[in-house]
Amino acid sequence: MFYVYIIRCEDNSLYTGYTTDIERRLSEHHNQDKKGAKYTKSHKLKGLEALWECESKSVAMSLEYFIKKLKKSDKEKIIENQKIIYEISDGKFNGKILESM
């Protein structure tokens, strides 16, 4: 399984990533592990805001890229209602995102 996630940092910034093991990845971000993202080493993790399960690595990477290009206000809308991703993407991810959590 592949997951795309949005985490909130203590400075209220948002970070988007993808992984095959969400618990491990969040631990890396939280502990500011050397395997964690450069961004979260300088922006302490506050918590997980959104999570999607995707059918393949290519879908997860496409979704991550799509979300990273959005304005913060659009990311906040997605956090409020994760299923809105289908509308914002003009249906691009319909059927490819298996579940939002």
Image: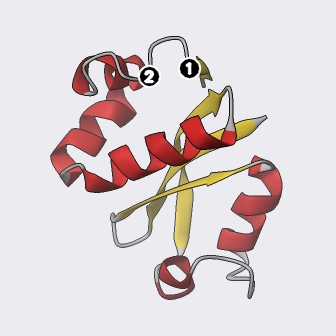
How far is disc 2 from disc 1 in space, using C-alphas?
A: 5 Å
* Residues at marks 2 and 1 touching, judged by CB atoms closer than 8 Å: yes
74 sits to left or right of 16: left
SS of the residue under disc 1: loop
What label does residue 96 carry, if any?
Answer: 1
Q: Residue at x 81, y 50 (%)?
A: 21
The quarter of the picture where the C terminus appears is top right
The quarter of the picture where the N terminus appears is top right
In the figure, 91 relative to 3: above or below?
Answer: above
The quarter of the picture where residue 3 lies is top right
Residue 84: image x %, image y %? 32, 20
SS of the residue under disc 2: loop
Q: Disc 2 marks which residue?
A: 93
Q: Residue at x 24, y 19 (%)?
A: 90
Residue 94: image x %, image y %? 45, 13
In the figure, 69 relative to 41: above or below?
Answer: above
74 sits to left or right of 49: left
